[in-house]
Image (cartoon, rainbow, N blue to C red):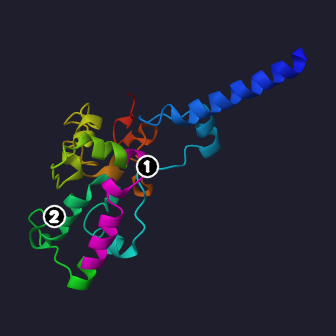
Amino acid sequence: MKCKLSIVSLLLLSTVMLGMSTASFSSDDKSGFFSRILSSGKTPGVAPVANPQYLEECGSCHFPYQPGLLPERSWSKLMTGLEDHFAENAELPLEDANSITDYLIKNAADHANYKRSKKIMKSLHPNQLPLRVSKTPYFIKKHNELSRKMVQDNPKVGSISNCKACHTKAEKGSFSEREILIPGFGAWED
């Protein structure tokens, strides 16, 4: 009888630990032990870009930022001002602009279920309207230790907006600190 009771107790304890491991760290970048084993760390922080038109039109000039890096209100504002898109004329035919806007809005941070998208939204004031990913409080906090020498004065980086220069899996939506290689400085160590 003691053996059966011990087995039941062990199973119950294992079930509780499994539940804690998969849920208890959901509010930060860490995952529970079992969820790390089951997912092999393959879930990106934001959904990767999955729209060929957006990749072609926007990605031909700059890194195609994942929609989950900004809220809907930011994407709407950016897409209605393409004639002066950061001092460049990026106007598109109306049909193309509407199609891309629809994609960006449907996949914006406030509609996404990815951890970094949620953190970005949590960092914003309700009416805050960032027009650059680099102006979100979350982004600023995550990049506050970088020196000018590492970014602006680094010819292989040049700008804080050049995500793929350091984030080796940025195009896949993964911005994990374990995947950072700063040109001329090596792996990021926090």
Quarter of the image for the C terminus: give it.
Answer: top left
Dot 2 falls on a residue whose secondary structure is helix
Relative to 48, residue 154 above or below: above
In magenta stretch: residue 99: yes
Q: Earlier in the sequence, mark 2 or mark 1?
A: 2
- Label 2 vs label 1: CA separation? 25 Å
Relative to 149, residue 94 above or below: below
Marks counted in the figure total 2
Q: Residue furthest top?
A: 2
Q: Amino acid at mark 2?
A: Lys
Q: Residues within 10 Å of mark 1 (few under 14, many from 20)?
A: many
Q: Going by the image, does 116 lie left or right of 161?
A: right
Q: Quadrant of residue 102?
A: bottom left
Q: Residues within 10 Å of mark 2 (few under 14, many from 20)?
A: some
Relative to 96, residue 4 above or below: above
Q: Amino acid at mark 1?
A: Ser
Q: Going by the image, does 65 lie left or right of 180?
A: left
Where residue 166 is drawn, which disc sits there? Answer: none
Residue that carries the numbered disc 1 in the rendered image: 174
Dot 1 falls on a residue whose secondary structure is loop
Q: Residue furthest front?
A: 1
Q: Nearer the viewer, residue 39 or 6?
A: 6
Q: Quadrant of residue 1?
A: top right
Frontmost of labels 2 and 1 is 2
Task: State which region is magenta.
Answer: 98-116
Residue 64 seen in the current view: yes
Image coordinates for residue 92, horizontal then vertical, percent: 20, 80
Residue that carries the numbered disc 2 in the rendered image: 77
